[in-house]
Image: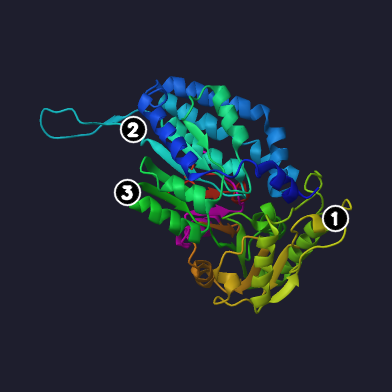
Amino acid sequence: MLPGRYRVKLCSTKAKMSEEYVREAINGAQDAFQSGLWNKAPAIHRSKILSKLARLLEERIPELAAIETLQTGRPIREMKAQLSRLPEWLDYFAALLRTYQGFVAPTQGNLLNYVQRVPLGVVAQITPFNHPLLIAVKKIAPALAAGNSVVVKPSEACILLEFADMAGQAGIPAGVLTVLPGIGATVGKAIVSHPHVRKVDVTASTRTGRAVGQAAGANIASFTAELGGKAPIIVFDDADIQSAVNGVAFASFIASGQTCVSGTRIIIQDGVYNSFVSALVEKTNNIRSRMGNPMNPQSTMGPVISEHHLTRIERILGRMQGKVLCGGHRLTGASPLDGFDYTHGSFLAPTIIEDVESTDELWREEVFGPVIVVRRFKDVEEGVAFANDCKYGLGAGIWTSNLTRAHRVAGDIETGLCWVNTHHRNDPSSPWYVSIYISKLVNTQILPGVA
């Protein structure tokens, strides 16, 4: 059965929520905060409960992976790999609670000047469809650890009620974690506009982020937003070509390209351009040949989230001026892998396009699908200039065997997150927006660094 059709059955009865119910839920979150049951509990108590939640989550990974595959259409092997790491975020912030200390700041006179971190109160979090539980847990774990009451509005395509149930089982008091499914224009707006909300954290499109930011600003609430990307990947002449091809394919087509840091603009040095692109096309066609039922562990790539989104991507492709090297069309008929009927989902063949100018929509705007452009460059300066020729600046990648150049170029690219000889690697100890990950392919360990 089509993942999307199952998703409608799963979510439709839960997603219609009135504004009055939202107000009551946020008032309940505020009451829970004012009661002090969570935010004034000893840090060691909160730590133990977060650790217990991590263990409960760990036990249910296979079940939750299947649910996320049915909701999003992402291959089951992707979801099992991704969700298996989620307990790390809960364990990490549980450990921080046991070790965090305030500090005494120097001052003048016979005074004691000390600094402590305190919870804000009710924190609203808006999460997207592409990594439903991953992004939610990455936001929820630190907010709960700090003692806040958390209200989560997941994408209407993917709900998180199972996780909320587990939180209650772990011992998190009622009202401290609330999940409010529903449509962003109604439920989301009602949440972020509520005067009790002291912070809003959103992962969404730029358009949605602007609207949410305006509502948060009206309440003078703290605001954090991650609003998409158009990640460049620079491949230098001295890169290990096979490793780079595999890495770029992974960077670009995992989650069907529906990731804010997906590699989308592949910038390749002249000396290896032809051989690299040829190998990448071959790799991409291989991915295409093994697309099938997302519940099949052998399936390599799933559909995009909806027919509406697929139509949007097709329209972008119809407007572009470049040359399609592979893909560029929706899939129909039966999968060569397992006979799965592609018309049961919104499947697009993984796509590579060349001869795209910097002014083209494909270069400048987020497609959020399995579509990448390839472009050649002459030297470091031109490669960095191409990488920076875009309004987005969330993620980037570099492939080279020269560690000195890797560090220099990572510093020159205008991005918050940069991978070298790897991609999509992250860790709870590293800030999501400002980090550099260096792969052992350049003879060093994976090192998170803060810019």
Of circles 1 and 2, the one toward us is 1
Residue 152: x %, y % from top left? 51, 41
Q: CA distance from mark 1 to mark 2?
A: 53 Å
Image point (85%, 55%), residue name: 341
- Residue on which the image places disc 3: 220
Q: CA distance from mark 2 to mark 3?
A: 18 Å
Residue 76: x %, y % from top left? 74, 43
Please state if 240 lies on the left or on the right of 170 as rendered. right
State whether residue 433 appears in this view. no
Given the image, on which type of amino acid does mark 3 rest?
Ile
Mark 3 or mark 1, which is nearer the start of the sequence? 3
Residue 211 tag number: none
**Which residue range is magenta in the image?**
403-429
- Residue on which the image places disc 2: 118
Q: How is the image coloured?
A: rainbow
Mark 2 or mark 1, which is nearer the start of the sequence? 2
The 10 Å Cα crowd at callout 1, few under 14, some 14 to 19, many 20 or more, is some
Q: Is residue 32 above or below residue 402?
A: above
Residue 72: x %, y % from top left? 68, 48
Given the image, on which type of amino acid does mark 2 rest?
Val
Q: Is residue 37 above or below residue 381?
A: above
Q: Quadrant of residue 115?
A: top left
- Residue on which the image places disc 1: 341
